[in-house]
């Protein structure tokens, strides 16, 4: 069995997918690289097939009709044969030294007496034109170099979240939790990280800058204008996360606190984008979103409004909307808008 399956969702990725795949090839026979061509119209299918031909047993090309990022991740999970599972987007890449260290540790833990459910590592914002590269680290909140559980973790600060770039999950855990991402929807990476969390018992954190998260393309999903144009998809993800769990029934306090904060930042991002669009239609969608939360779970509604960002999101009038943009800086830390 392979140690690690790595899914690369690709849609019209001919300009940058080779850099991504090449960064993963040094994993050798320990990994399988699942290049998922999601109905591309350019040379992506041919590039995927060429890598499969050149690296049989390591690279597998998967071709499917276009279903969006979620459908590509779902395909990766379905086809994965590795003990662990990682998603690397086609315009991102990984650091070679950190990659080797993580693979070695995964092999060690795979042979241990306790099952590893989630590996966490740092990621670097490779923002085009930025002089200093921001790194999302977790050394201040997570124990290092040992297996640990939620009760061993400290409380995450605002702006410090586990994103898809940070995690490697045990493959079977993703199947056991029933994870199936919605199709034709952006921002489903938030669900990918969020839904499995209550199933995670044993974790391991490595303080290495493994994942390189590229930000800078004009058509990128985290471009602010693109996000505003796709706000209905952001709201859909936001609502699906709300519907997934009654967070107040999660027994572990640290996990419950983390998931409430996670849901708060997603709701803040939805709200900030609706406010920054400045249209009457989107300001009405903001009102509808908060009304939906109120009707769905009144305790959650009050918890989100009590939060620092929740309060700023709901101040009345133009002045309140201006103040709410301060929360934008925290959401920038998480997403790194370009």
Image (tube, rainbow, N blue to C red):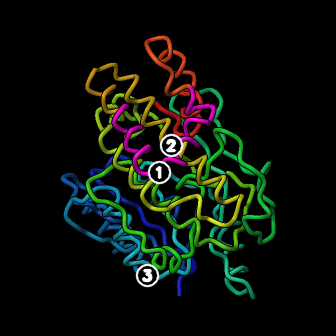
x and y percentages locating residue 263 in the rendered image: 53, 48
Taking depth in this image into account, of 147 and 111 the one nearest to the observer is 147
Tell me the distance, in whole angstroms, between the alpha carbons under discs 1 and 2. 6 Å
Q: Secondary structure at mark 1?
A: loop
* Residue at mark 3: 57
Which one is closest to the eye, mark 2 or mark 3? Answer: 2
Give the magenta-colored segment's residue range. 286-311
* Residue at mark 1: 297
Taking depth in this image into account, of 110 and 320 the one nearest to the observer is 320
Badge number at residue 301: 2
Principal secondary structure, stretch drawn in magenta: helix
Tell me the distance, in whole angstroms, between the alpha carbons under discs 1 and 3. 48 Å
Q: Is residue 324 magenta?
A: no
x and y percentages locating residue 323 in the rendered image: 54, 17
In this rendering, is residue 309 above or below 115?
above
Q: Residue at x 43, y 78 (%)?
A: 80
Sequence-wise first label, 2 or 3: 3
Which one is closest to the eye, mark 1 or mark 3? Answer: 1
Is 314 on the left-hand or right-hand side of 223?
right
Sequence-wise first label, 1 or 3: 3
Q: Residue at x 43, y 81 (%)?
A: 57
In this rendering, is residue 159 above or below 13?
above
Quick check: marks 2 and 3 in contact, CB under 8 Å?
Answer: no
Is 91 on the left-hand or right-hand side of 110?
left
Mark 2 surroundings: few (<14), some (14-19) or many (≥20) residues within 10 A: some
Quick check: marks 1 and 3 in contact, CB under 8 Å?
Answer: no
x and y percentages locating residue 275 in the rendered image: 40, 24
């Amino acid at each position: 069995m392979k140690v690690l399956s790595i899914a690369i969702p690709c849609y019209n990725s001919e300009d940058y997918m080779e850099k991504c795949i090449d960064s993963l090839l040094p994993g050798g026979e320990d990994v399988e690289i699942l290049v998922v061509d999601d109905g591309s119209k350019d040379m992506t299918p041919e590039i995927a097939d060429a890598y499969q031909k050149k690296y049989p047993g390591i690279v597998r090309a998967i071709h499917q009709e276009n279903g969006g990022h979620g459908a590509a991740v779902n395909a990766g999970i379905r086809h994965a044969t590795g003990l662990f599972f990682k998603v690397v987007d086609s315009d991102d890449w990984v650091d070679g030294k950190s990659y080797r260290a993580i693979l070695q540790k995964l092999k060690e833990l795979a042979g241990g007496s306790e099952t590893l459910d989630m590996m966490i590592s740092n990621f670097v914002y490779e923002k085009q034109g930025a002089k200093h590269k921001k790194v999302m680290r977790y050394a201040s909140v997570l124990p290092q170099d040992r297996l640990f559980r939620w009760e061993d973790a400290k409380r995450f600060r605002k702006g410090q979240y586990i994103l898809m770039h940070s995690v490697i999950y045990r493959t079977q855990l993703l199947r056991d939790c029933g994870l199936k991402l919605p199709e034709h929807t952006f921002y489903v990476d938030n669900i990918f990280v969020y839904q499995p969390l209550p199933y995670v018992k044993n974790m391991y954190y490595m303080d290495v800058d493994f994942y390189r998260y590229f930000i800078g393309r004009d058509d990128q999903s985290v471009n602010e204008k693109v996000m505003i144009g796709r706000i209905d998809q952001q709201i859909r993800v936001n609502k699906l996360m709300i519907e997934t769990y009654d967070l107040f029934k999660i027994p572990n306090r640290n996990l419950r606190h983390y998931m409430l904060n996670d849901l708060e930042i997603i709701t803040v991002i939805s709200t900030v984008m609706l406010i920054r669009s400045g249209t009457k239609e989107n300001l009405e969608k903001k009102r509808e979103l908060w009304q939906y939360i109120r009707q769905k779970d009144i305790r959650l509604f009050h918890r989100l409004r009590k939060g620092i960002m929740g309060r700023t999101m709901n101040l009345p009038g133009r002045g309140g909307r201006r103040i709410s943009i301060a929360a934008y800086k925290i959401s920038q830390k998480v997403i790194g808008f370009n």
